[in-house]
Amino acid sequence: MGKLSAAITAVGAYVPKFILTNKMLEGMVDTNDEWITTRTGIKERRILKPEEGEGTSYLAIKAVKNLLSKKEVDPSEIELVIVATATPDSTVASTAAFVASEIGATNAFAFDLLAACSSFLFGMSTAARYIESGRYKKVLLIGADKMSSIIDYTDRTTCIIFGDGAGAVLFEPNTEGMGLQDEYLRADGSGRPYLGMDAGGSLLPASLETVKNRKHYIYQDGKTVFKFAVSNMADVAERIMKLNNLDHTDIAWLVPHQANKRIIDATANRMGLDGSKVMMNIQRYGNTTSATLPLLLSDYEDQLKKGDNLVFAAFGGGFTWGSIYLKWAYN
Ligand code: UT7
């Protein structure tokens, strides 16, 4: 029997029904379709409206149900549920615990994992460790964010970028050499001033003042974040290739965080990949934070073949960033 590795064996996804187009944003803030398209690559994003459902858990549960409709898994056999998110339903009580109960994962333990736009990537690493330990056989990793809950729709620098969505993957043991091969993960707290949300945490609890001063919305120094994201995402993707003796012909797909088409293109260029090997859906969903990577896997699942080499790369608030090399496990 070969070495035990952690493979993705199923994928599911969900995006809310309401579509917020660039045209609609033109009526809300001083912006235009041409600016948004050329600067970001985004055309539209999905927004969870109260009449459809509430909270990040709603999106997460829908994504898991989609996964379970495609793969026969008894939810009671799932041992761990991780919800990667920057927008949990509420603080303190674990969103993952609620999701686990709702999907029937009654024997699982569950926790949330927060690393901004790198949450899902770091979640892949975490899920893999539990599987590789030999102790756990079914780990469900969900990336879900209701970004619209922390967006100021009068701020043109952020409201054009983010959208809501969720994706889920199942990790199981593999002895054929498929699954997670290597990773290079990083963090740098000096990035905190450039991307985040000022109030609502322990540092600055909610008060009348914080609400009045609009401190419960996400802010971003876009230019600075862009600079760090472009160089760091490309650096780690190039590094994971070198560490594993991969050249561009070995790679079937780049699976990049969907923050800005220009960042994705720069990463692909550094790796020597042409556009046909780059997963991209930013035009339809915008930046869904923890959901971008599993939403890509769901959109491209039909094109993936067993043994395909995938390189994941992400960059997010904190700063947090990294790259993962994974062999796809099924056709
Ligand atoms: O996922 C987590 C990581 N996040 C990222 O990776 C995001 C990184 N940053 C970015 O993607 C880009 O910086 C943005 C898309 C956020 C902004 O693009 P940019 O090319 O960096 O634009 P900028 O901030 O330098 O702004 C250029 C101009 C400014 O006007 P002036 O000062 O040149 O007159 C802005 O005020 O564009 C203006 N501007 C807008 N104009 C129309 C800013 N937002 C808008 C807008 N519509 N929505």
Image (tube, helix red, strand yellow):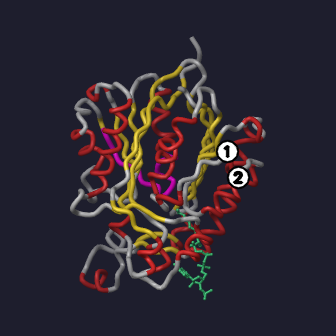
Write the start and end of the magenta stretch as one range: 110-122
Element type where label 2 sits in the image: helix
* Residue bearing mark 1: 277
Figure quadrant of residue 258: bottom right
Kindly check if marks 2 and 1 are in contact, taking CB atoms under 8 A apart as contact.
yes
In the image, residue 120 lies in the stretch drawn in magenta: yes
Residue pictured at 64% horizontal, 65% vertical: 228
In front of the other: 144 or 188: 144
In the picture, measured across the screen, residue 316 lies left or right of residue 231, that is left
Q: Disc 2 residue type?
A: Ala
Residue ranking furthest to the front = 23
Q: Residue at x 33, y 33 (%)?
A: 69
Instruction: Indicate the position of residue 165 as horizontal and vertical percent values.
Output: 39, 54
Considering depth in this image, is 49 or 232 the residue closer to the camera? 49
- Can you say which quadrant of the picture contains the N terminus? top right
Residue at 60% of width from left, 22% of height from top? 177
Quarter of the rendered image showing ligand 1: bottom right
Q: Is residue 218 above or below residue 303?
A: below
Residue 179, percent from left and from top:
56, 30
| Residue 90 drawn at (x, y percent) | 26, 59
Res 268 label = 2
**Image quadrant for the C terminus?**
top right
Instruction: In the rendered view, tell whether residue 20 sits above or below residue 331.
Output: below
Task: Please tell me whether residue 49 belongs to the stretch shown in magenta.
Answer: no
Which residue is painted at 24% across and 57% down in the image? Answer: 52
